[in-house]
Image (cartoon, grey):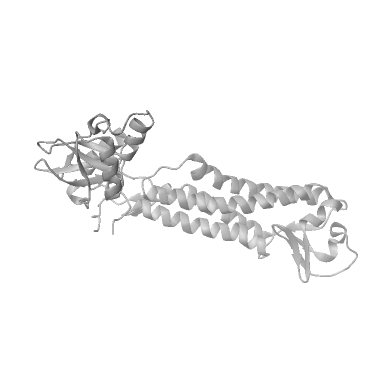
């Protein structure tokens, strides 16, 4: 199995598993001939060779047919392959993988022919090359030396984000802890009830909860103002963006393992919004209690505040995972 992490060792085409199941077609054949052969072989690309010498000239892809023939309204029965194919210099088994990758990247194509002694032996794709591209910049930033920084960052970010989601969303959702707490008997005016009970009340994500006592925040809107509607809205946002942050961090860190770049929204904005909404929810609850008349006797739940801080810190750690791991000086072989 291929190690998806990048390393310093340079690899060559002969280190890849060359795809020898490919189709070949003469450069003088028509586009219709090429399309028929693609359908027959079930492949999206054909290697184009010169009729007499079998010299590799390039590759014809189904996208080339669509873009250069169908879209232009040309006759596929008359149009020749040589006028439609993309010309790409083949690579040899002794060429670096980086060379094959660069040729495909520069032409924005997916396949490059592989030759040995000027004879076609197969093709390799840009996906084949990804895991064998060495780091352009040796990763010297980070505290912990590891042999595979990308994989370490993926698992670190995944574990941090899952724990953060459980602590920051699941626990206050099911009442493990609250944002604020108070004695039920001292909160009668807030809840609008004359029933006197003892016991501690926790203000969680969507409700106030105690022993044999549960009041959803939506029930407090009519009595205590629209501030509680705002709290409910931000509680929903915490739940939504907590889920989005969980998946976006895992996706962006896994994309990093595969050497695929993700955008600012996925990598940074969605997780940060989760933190922002969590902080705002704390502030809104404090404001709601401060403006309530009469003022309820509540205090910040110390456990809840600590766990919220831990949750937000774990999300930040997952976002800035690059600063936790650095590449070991010795590189490892790619296992096969």
Q: Quadrant of the N terminus?
A: bottom left
Up-down: is 301 above or below 107? below
Left or right of 238 on screen, residue 231: right
- Residue at image position (81%, 65%) is 184
Q: Where in the figure is residue 151, as x and y percent of width and height?
A: 37, 54
Up-down: is 210 above or below 121? below
| Residue toward you, 229 or 291 | 229
Q: How many marks?
A: 0
Q: Quadrant of the C terminus?
A: bottom left
Evaluate whether residue 77 shows in this view.
Answer: yes
- Residue at image position (57%, 57%) is 165
Up-down: is 276 above or below 73? below
Q: Where in the figure is residue 245, as x and y percent of width and height?
A: 54, 50
Left or right of 272 on screen, residue 137: left
| Residue toward you, 199 or 216 | 216
Evaluate whether residue 307 shows in this view.
Answer: no
Q: Where in the figure is residue 172, as x and y percent of width and height?
A: 66, 60
| Residue toward you, 235 or 83 | 83
Q: Quadrant of residue 141?
A: top left
Q: Quadrant of residue 80?
A: top left
Left or right of 262 on screen, residue 287: right
- Residue at image position (18%, 43%) is 114
- Residue at image position (28%, 49%) is 40
Q: Where in the figure is residue 259, as x and y percent of width and height?
A: 36, 46
């Amino acid at each position: 199995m291929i190690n998806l992490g990048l390393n310093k060792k340079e690899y060559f085409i002969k280190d890849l598993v060359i795809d020898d199941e490919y189709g070949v077609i003469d450069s003088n054949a028509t586009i219709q001939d090429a399309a028929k052969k693609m359908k027959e072989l079930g492949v999206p690309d054909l290697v184009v060779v010169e009729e007499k010498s079998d010299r590799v000239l390039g590759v014809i892809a189904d996208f080339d047919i669509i873009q250069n023939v169908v879209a232009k309204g040309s006759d596929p029965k008359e149009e020749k392959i040589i006028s439609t194919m993309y010309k790409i210099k083949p690579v040899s088994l002794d060429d670096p993988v980086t060379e094959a990758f660069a040729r495909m990247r520069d032409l924005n194509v997916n396949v490059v022919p592989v030759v040995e002694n000027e004879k076609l032996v197969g093709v390799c794709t840009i996906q084949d090359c990804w895991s064998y591209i060495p780091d352009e910049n040796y990763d010297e930033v980070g505290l912990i030396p590891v042999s595979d920084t990308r994989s370490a960052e993926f698992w670190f970010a995944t574990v941090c984000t899952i724990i953060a989601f459980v602590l920051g969303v699941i626990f206050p959702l099911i009442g493990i802890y609250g944002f604020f707490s108070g004695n039920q008997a001292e909160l009668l005016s807030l809840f609008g009830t004359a029933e006197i009970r003892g016991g501690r009340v926790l203000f969680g994500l969507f409700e106030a909860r105690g022993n044999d006592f549960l009041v959803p925040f939506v029930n407090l809107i009519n009595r205590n103002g629209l501030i509680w509607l705002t709290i409910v809205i931000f509680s929903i946002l915490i739940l939504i963006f907590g889920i989005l942050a969980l998946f976006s961090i895992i996706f962006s860190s896994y994309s990093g393992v595969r050497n695929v770049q993700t955008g600012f929204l996925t990598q940074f904005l969605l997780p940060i919004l989760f933190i922002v909404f969590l902080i705002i929810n704390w502030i809104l609850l404090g404001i709601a209690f401060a403006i309530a008349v009469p003022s309820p006797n509540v205090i910040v739940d110390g456990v809840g505040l600590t766990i919220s801080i831990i949750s937000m810190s774990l999300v930040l750690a997952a976002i800035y995972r690059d600063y936790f791991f650095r590449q070991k000086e010795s590189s490892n072989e790619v296992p096969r």
